[in-house]
């Protein structure tokens, strides 16, 4: 394969990695279900039902007891991992993290995404860093695999049994050899433990356990896996405890293959391996045992965890006295607030699977006879299809609940209520209706957790959820095919409406589910992103009050007409921002008294979160940096602002020699400097527009937006304007930004004719600074030098190194280094400016959206023209409403 072709394939795989992963998961699930179908070819559904009925309460009680012991041992995984990384966390927090993590990953698979996210939320709320959470996950994973290896090695070495997998016999000798290898690896692990405290992996330090901790990890994992396997063993008919070692080997192989496959919950994969590993067990009884095991070890803990989370979440919104709780309790409620939606989403997804499976199974004849006395047949048929449709919709709404969307909550609540009715109307499935009713109660109790406005449709179908949903539909279709495999297919089955026409109902329900699933996927492709929420108008009084106290001249960007505003409750401060796609971009520091800044920044954070947006603060200064850190934002240095102190500014002396020289050259060329008051600017607008048009044409640029002004008659008429004339013709101009408290003077638009004489811009700046000093201004801002001041040492972040390279070598793109050199001649003080966003990924995406916004996209004045009203007190000012 050529290098170019390999590169194209690599690029394709990277671009569509998520979609490819979802496709692989679906393929694995389909193959596993096909294998299970083949292995159960001779088994009928009524045989499985009979085997389920034959399970004794003693067997179920023993399975539940072993399940409880296994999950108790699982909590020790995190306890040991925290000791390895030398972090102290209360046991209740570690137990909560472990229990929530494993109940999610056991049922959904993809443990790093499901269980890992639960751990991250709980542990970061308890004070651990993201790196600490990753180390906990790594050590917990090591614990699990070490126990599996130890018990499997012992079982293969001491109790080898005939093992047939996919027609291949694995003899006793091979099994013993594998057992020796596994035990050798465990001995090596224990021997190596304690020699080093950590190892480096791709530049990241991973803590290693001591020898004592390594032994404890193996023992804890062995207890967990042994108890989990015992929970299935007691449910399998015809097995004596003497055969447990051989059974465990098959069980261990099943969970290893299921874990490697990443199939959602190991559905199909785990069952197929168990069926292959236990050929001597009655197939009907083994299928019933596997179903019961799924209920005991997977679904029941999930329900317990979800009810617990919903109860705690409900208390957060229903108990005002909780405000008097301790800080620990407050942190705990915050954890529940973030974790509960994940469990409720999983429960709703499980409820959807239940409805699909129920629609694929025949109704109980006795109940149908009773139903026939009171409900007409067409209504039963419609209810059967409707119940399956409700189940499918619940699968697609589950991700919306996970993201805490109020629209998903409202729709799910309605669907669960409808599902209760349809379950009773299609076959008096009161057990199914009871489960849905309980789900409805749990959802309603925790309604306060779903506070985000419904912008979820644009991102409804992620590849992971598509894979999980497809797996659920495949499972339901396979169950139906298995249940009705004895019915010979006929075209008339589609139209066969009869009380015992279960196969016909299955075909019609399957068609409806498939059509609805395809429709939802097409809708995902056709939907545009939801529009941003309506902007709040900024009154003239609030603008006057905020500008009266600001120390930053760039607060005048509030007058450009292309921003939204968040106003402080006191009415004397505001934050200017705009929404681009899903990114909320705040321009600079808040404007107004410093005491109002934290509340404004936190409120904007809450609004963006409620609207499913990512938030980015652009060009904030050191004063706002502590609040951005409190927000937990990722922060990068963007550049440095040049501020010239005016109190001692002079053109005399050695430092002013270059400026005096430039001034003399400009005056020789006939350049004259002048300050035009705002009242006289309208008369100059035609001349200024000609200069602006010539400048834009010469630079090959269009008007920008958001982070600077644009040539607009109403905007420019509001400010004094500095102009340079050569003769009677205006050759350069700049509108002035001046803070009312005379702290800072600056310029916004700086435009000149292409034939401007050398040093004329130096003349403009020098005279402006002298004028500003005489008017009593404290400093003059020369604006930002992007990417300057970034240190590119060997251990600096990749962002800083790349930015420094662009700064030094990117003169062909933009005069980064030349711009700083030019401003340096005025002897300024350099103040850093930063970009902050809620996460590294949000930062990268936000910068992309920011570029579109600044380039005159949605946020431009032209786009806002028909959405603006005049600002009271500022003639011609446009504020978004």
Image (cartoon, rainbow, N blue to C red):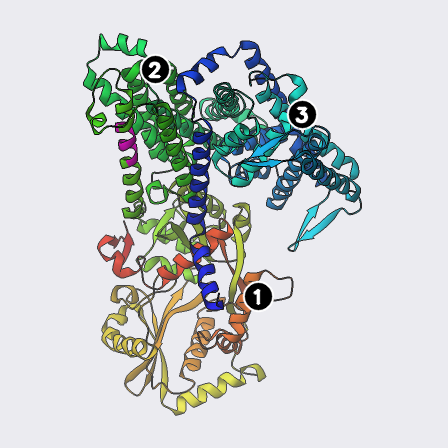
- Nearer to us of marks 1 and 2 is 2
Which mark lies nearer to you, 3 or 2? 3
| Residue on which the image places disc 3 | 245
Judge the density around disc 2: few (<14), some (14-19), many (≥20) Cα neighbours within 10 Å.
some
Q: Would residue 734 appear left or right of 310 to someone viewing this image?
A: left
Instruction: Find residue 817 and report its horizontal and vertical position in percent.
Output: 51, 75
State how far apart marks 1 and 2 are (Cα): 64 Å
Disc 1 target residue: 801
Residue on which disc 2 sits: 429
Where are the magenta residues, as a range?
Answer: 508-514
**In the image, is residue 73 above or below residue 687?**
above
Q: Is residue 556 above or below residue 93?
A: below
Whether residue 308 can be seen here: yes
Find out whether the residues at labels 3 and 2 contact each other: C-beta distance under 8 Å.
no
Magenta includes 119? no
Instruction: State if disc 3 and disc 1 touch (CB < 8 Å).
Output: no
Q: Quadrant of residue 162?
A: top right
In front of the other: 163 or 397: 163
Question: Is residue 406 at all visible to an observer of this figure?
Answer: no
Q: Which mark is residue 68?
A: none
The relative height of residue 637 versus residue 571 in the rendered view (above or below) is below
Reply above or below: 771 against 204.
below
In this view, the residue in front, 181 or 463, is 181
- Mark 1 residue element: helix
* Percent coordinates x, y for residue 548 in the rendering: 41, 55
Query: From the viewer's perspective, is the residue at label 1 or at label 3 nearer?
Result: 3
**Residue at left offset 59%, top offset 20%:** 233
Between discs 1 and 3, the one toward the N terminus: 3
- Dot 2: element: loop
Looking at marks 1 and 2 on the same chain, the residue that comes earlier in the sequence is marked by 2
């Amino acid at each position: 394969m050529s290098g170019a072709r390999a590169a194209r394939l690599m690029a394709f795989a990277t671009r569509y990695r998520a979609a490819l992963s979802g496709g692989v998961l679906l393929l694995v699930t389909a193959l596993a279900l096909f294998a299970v179908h083949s292995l159960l070819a001779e088994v009928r559904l009524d045989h499985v039902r009979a085997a389920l009925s034959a399970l004794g309460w003693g067997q179920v009680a023993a399975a539940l007891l072993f399940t409880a012991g296994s999950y108790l041992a699982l909590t020790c995984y995190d306890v040991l991992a925290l000791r390895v990384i030398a972090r102290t966390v209360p046991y209740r927090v570690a137990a909560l993290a472990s229990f929530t993590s494993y109940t999610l990953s056991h049922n959904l698979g993809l443990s790093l995404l499901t269980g890992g996210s639960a751990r991250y939320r709980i542990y970061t709320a308890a004070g651990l860093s993201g790196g600490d959470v990753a180390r906990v996950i790594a050590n917990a994973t090591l614990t699990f695999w070490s126990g599996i290896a130890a018990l499997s090695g012992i079982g293969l070495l001491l109790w080898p049994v005939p093992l047939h997998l996919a027609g291949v016999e694995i003899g006793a000798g091979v099994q013993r050899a594998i057992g020796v290898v596994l035990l050798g690896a465990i001995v090596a692990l224990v021997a190596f433990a304690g020699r080093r405290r950590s190892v480096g992996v791709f530049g990241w330090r991973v803590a290693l356990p001591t020898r004592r901790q390594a032994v404890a990890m193996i023992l804890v994992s062995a207890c967990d896996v042994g108890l989990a396997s015992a929970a299935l063993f007691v449910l399998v008919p015809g097995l004596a405890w003497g055969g447990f070692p051989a059974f465990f080997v098959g069980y261990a192989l099943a969970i290893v293959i299921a874990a490697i496959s990443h199939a959602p919950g190991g559905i199909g994969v785990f069952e197929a391996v168990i069926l292959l590993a236990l050929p001597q067990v009655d197939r009907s009884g083994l299928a019933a045992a596997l179903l019961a095991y799924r209920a005991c070890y997977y679904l029941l803990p999930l329900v317990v965890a979800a009810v617990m989370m919903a109860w705690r979440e409900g208390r957060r919104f229903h108990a005002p006295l909780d405000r008097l709780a301790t800080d620990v309790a407050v942190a705990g409620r915050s954890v529940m607030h973030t974790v509960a939606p994940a469990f409720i989403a999983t429960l709703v997804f499980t409820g959807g699977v239940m409805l699909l499976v129920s629609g694929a199974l025949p109704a109980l004849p006795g109940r149908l006879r009773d139903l026939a006395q009171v409900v007409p047949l067409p209504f039963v048929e419609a209810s059967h299809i409707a119940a399956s449709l409700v189940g499918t919709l619940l699968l697609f709404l589950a991700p919306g609940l996970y993201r805490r969307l109020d629209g998903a909550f409202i729709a799910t609540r309605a669907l669960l209520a409808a599902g209760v009715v349809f379950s009773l109307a299609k076959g008096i499935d009161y057990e199914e209706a009871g489960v849905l009713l309980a789900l409805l109660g749990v959802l309603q109790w925790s309604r306060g957790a779903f506070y985000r406005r419904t912008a979820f449709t644009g991102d409804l179908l992620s590849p992971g959820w598509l894979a999980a949903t497809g797996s659920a539909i495949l499972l339901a279709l396979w169950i139906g095919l298995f249940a009705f495999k004895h019915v010979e297919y006929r075209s008339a089955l589609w139209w066969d409406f009869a009380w015992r026409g279960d196969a016909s109902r299955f075909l019609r329900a399957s068609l409806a589910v498939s059509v609805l699933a395809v429709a939802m996927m097409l809708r995902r492709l056709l939907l545009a992103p939801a529009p941003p929420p309506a902007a709040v108008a900024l009154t003239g009084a609030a603008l006057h009050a905020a500008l009266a106290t600001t120390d930053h001249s760039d607060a005048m960007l509030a007058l450009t007409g292309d921003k939204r505003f968040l106003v402080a409750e006191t009415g004397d401060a505001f934050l200017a921002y705009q929404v681009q796609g899903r990114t909320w971009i705040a321009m600079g520091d808040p404007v107004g008294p410093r005491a109002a800044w934290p509340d404004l920044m936190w409120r904007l954070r809450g609004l963006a979160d409620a609207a499913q947006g990512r938030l980015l603060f652009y060009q904030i200064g050191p004063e706002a940096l502590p609040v951005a850190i409190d927000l937990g934002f990722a922060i990068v240095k963007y550049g440095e602002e040049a501020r010239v102190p005016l109190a001692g500014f002079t053109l005399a002396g050695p430092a002013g020699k270059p400026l005096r020289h430039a001034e003399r050259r400009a005056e020789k060329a006939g350049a004259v400097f002048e300050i035009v008051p705002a009242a006289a600017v309208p008369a100059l607008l035609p001349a200024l527009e000609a200069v602006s048009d010539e400048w834009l044409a010469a630079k090959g640029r269009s008007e920008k937006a958001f982070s600077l002004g644009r040539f607009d008659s109403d905007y420019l008429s509001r400010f004094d304007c500095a102009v340079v004339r050569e003769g009677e013709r205006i050759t350069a101009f700049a509108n002035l930004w001046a803070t009312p408290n005379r702290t800072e003077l600056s310029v916004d638009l700086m435009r000149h004719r292409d034939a401007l004489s050398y040093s004329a811009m130096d003349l403009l700046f020098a005279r402006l600074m002298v004028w500003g000093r005489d008017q009593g201004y404290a400093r003059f801002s020369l604006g930002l030098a992007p990417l300057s001041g970034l240190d590119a040492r060997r251990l600096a972040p990749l962002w800083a190194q790349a930015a420094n390279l662009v700064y030094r070598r990117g003169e062909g793109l933009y005069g980064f280094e030349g711009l700083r050199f030019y401003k340096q001649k005025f002897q300024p003080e350099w103040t850093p400016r930063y970009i902050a966003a809620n996460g590294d990924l949000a930062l990268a995406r936000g910068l992309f959206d920011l570029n579109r916004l600044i380039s005159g996209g949605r946020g431009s004045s032209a786009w806002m023209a028909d959405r603006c009203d005049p600002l009271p007190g500022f003639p011609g000012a446009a504020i978004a409403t």
